[in-house]
Amino acid sequence: MSDKYSIGNRDVLLVVDIQNDFCPGGSLAVPRGDEVVPLINSLAAKFAHVLLTQDWHPRGHLSFASSHSGKKPYQTIEVAYGTQVLWPDHCLQGTTGAAFHGDLQIPHAELVLRKGYHREIDSYSAFYENDRKTRTGLAGYLGERGFRRVFLAGLAFDFCVRYSAEDAQREGFEAIVIDEACRGIDVNDSEATTRKLFKTLGVRCISANSIEGPPLTT
Ligand SMILES: [Zn+2]
């Protein structure tokens, strides 16, 4: 029998990057990424406190393959802070691709946290940019508001959800990933790596059904 989670005032749902470019038809589509939208809507209804993240890049961003001559998407390069995977151009500030999926309905979301707006640094995590030093301010925000548990859902499981969950745990929050409310990209075995890492760090992956409240829409 699995644990049940009853959601209270010190719990927050972090909805990661449910944006058009990460859904089928978008420039960096996560396979079946749009499938999580109805589930996330109904999960969000169980939380008093919901935050959304939004990948938000300027033109010529360092994470774009098009910014490096001769490079193709999914190749890697070495940058000042280590290895960076190159992606197709995506989530350009102010574009339809960067907008939230049209079916995402979370009017009570309290914060939209944008990330990836520094041209020279990518940002998978909602807490730290990829140099692992530049903070987004989210840890301070969660701390000031007295949140303890961070539930995570969204795209992609093995990148932005993964790094956000790891950092939440490292920052002293309890990170809990809602498995069916995420979809992965799986580049170079990244899904398996993510699951192993979650075990090591004590990040729990739970079923959406273990969250108490009205029945979920899937
Ligand atoms: Zn990005």
Image (tube, helix red, strand yellow):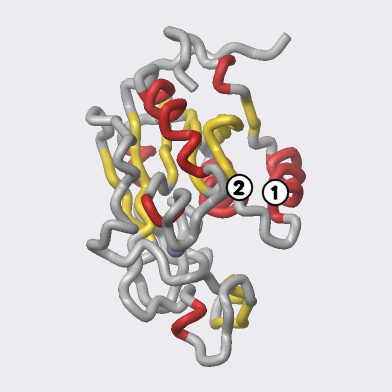
Kindly tell me whether mark 1's CB lies below 8 Å from ligand 1.
no
Q: Which residue is mark 1?
A: 191
**What is the CA distance from the residue labelled 2 to the residue labelled 1?**
7 Å
Determine whether the residue tagged by mark 1 lies in a helix, strand or loop.
Answer: helix
Q: Is residue 150 left or right of residue 45?
A: right
Q: Residue at x 67, y 60 (%)?
A: 187
Residue placed under numbered mark 2 in the picture:
184
Label 2–label 1 contact, CB within 8 A: yes
Beta carbon at label 2 within 8 Å of ligand 1: no
Is 174 placed above or below 58 here?
above
Of residues 16 and 21, the one nearer the viewer is 21
Residue 37 in percent (x, y) is at 42, 34
Is 42 situated above or below 121? above
Q: Is residue 177 visible?
A: yes
Q: Secondary structure at mark 2?
A: loop
Please give the label number shown on residue 37. Answer: none
Viewer-closest of 137 and 213: 213
Query: Where is residue 207 drawn, in percent x and y?
Result: 61, 23
Q: Residue at x 23, y 62 (%)?
A: 94
